[in-house]
Amino acid sequence: MSNLFKINSVTGRAAFNHADYRYFWLARLLGVLAIEMQITAISWQVYQLTGEALDLGLVGLAQFLPFLILFLVSGSLADRFKRTHIMSVCVILQTICGIIFFALTVNGEINFLTIFIILIFVGIARAFQSPAQSAIVPLLVPKEHVANAIAWTSSGFQMSRIAGPGIAGIMIISGEELVYATSIILFILSTIFTLLIKTNTQTISKTPINLKNIFNGLEFVLKRQILVGAIGLDLFAVLLGGATALLPIFATDILNVGSTGFGALRATHMIGALSGALLLTQYPITRFAGKSLLLSVVVFGLAIIIFGLSTYFWLSIAALFIIGSADSVSVFIRNNLVQIITPDQMRGRVSAVSAVFIGASNELGELESGVTAHFWGTVPAVVVGGIGTIAIAGLFAYKLPELRRVNSLDPDDLIEKYQKLETQT
């Protein structure tokens, strides 16, 4: 194994030695599982109700728009109020939405307009929940275990993303109401575990919630090369490398593997991401973090190109696995840099900026892939996207030398080098 990594059988699970982190991990795992199951059932139900592909797009839009509109405010609240309380309220709101979905479905009163309106409230809950969840992780474990906690948090997220749609798909055979009932139970359990978190080490920001302080998170990111580079690389990699949005076309028209092959392609990407995240819990990156981040984006871009050119199912599967794994490395390094460099009293606002940019790249990446595929053709669109991703990595390496020179992800090293002049309240 390269000296970029090291393993320790004890520290590989170090984050779970702390009760607050165990509660947080279970709360997030169950919450994401509930969301993934619920959205799978909603998408199926919407298509059965309307038969319109556009309505499926509106399902995603209803959840994302509140985030886009509220991310600056939600980040400020995550710094101004106790994050565990914000998280609890948000999961309770999601539970209530799940109960409404269940009741309307059982009574046969569900319709698309009602679903769209409820999803807006789900989006609002997630808009406030996301920055609070991201910003609380460094408070749950000692600083030497932060990287391990971030890696396990990412692994839990990927596990839920893989399991949720599959479980919901099986349950839908018995009816959408069974999925909604299960998601309600999971949301309730998530709420209980969130309420068990006792940490009180958060630095509560005393600044008033006004326009200047709301925009401080965005200003904080834009003034720091490392954060601009880390967030920007992920944004452009996902934006330009949105090959997964075109998987139905590849499965049907290029690889000729049908619906079964499509499911395998879709799952392989997530399994690659999960495998990469799990590997990082045991082999955390300890040296050359900036170069590793840039290299992971280059590998991501190369795998996108290979996938776009491939006419062999096995090669496409391998490329998607590498895409997911490389993305995990990028996410791991970005999350460490964002959470460690940012002072706790600013962490909610900066986490909100990071989350909305990455969330936007997912939505816009699908749009970019669809538009370019329409005008250029599917294969050229994917290949050009991969080339663009590599070009962006090269540009960032040249223009942002501070990012390239980041070595250790050790909190003491990062704080000493990059947080001396970072005090903002």
Image (tube, rainbow, N blue to C red):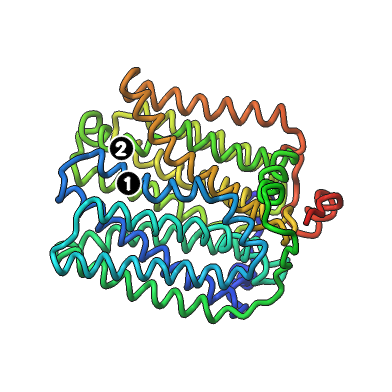
Instruction: Give the residue type that dot 2 points to.
Output: Leu
Q: Disc 1 designates what residue?
A: 266
Viewed as shown, does residue 358 lie left or right of 307? right
Q: Which residue is drawn at 32% across and 69% down?
A: 183
Instruction: Give the total of numbered labels.
Output: 2
Q: Disc 2 designates what residue?
A: 247
Report the Cα–Cα distance between label 1 and label 2. 7 Å
Viewer can see residue 281: no
Viewer-closest of 222 and 154: 222
Viewer-closest of 280 and 208: 208
Residue 339 position (above or below residue 192): above
Q: Residue at x 56, y 37 (%)?
A: 297
Instruction: Give the residue type that dot 1 points to.
Output: Arg
Q: Residue at x 55, y 42 (%)?
A: 357
Quadrant showing the C terminus: bottom right
Asked which secondary structure carries label 1, the reply is helix
Who comes first in sequence, dot 1 or dot 2?
2
Viewer-closest of 228 and 317: 228
Q: Which residue is drawn at 60% across and 65% down?
A: 149
Viewed as shown, does residue 28 lie left or right of 117? right
Residue 329 position (above or below residue 32): above
Residue 201: percent from the left, percent from the top?
Answer: 71, 73
Residue 403: percent from the left, percent from the top?
Answer: 72, 39
Tell whether label 2 touches label 1 (CB within 8 Å). yes
Q: Residue furthest top?
A: 376
Q: How crowded is mark 1: few (under 14 residues within 10 Å), some or many (20 or more)?
A: some
Residue 314: percent from the left, percent from the top?
Answer: 31, 39
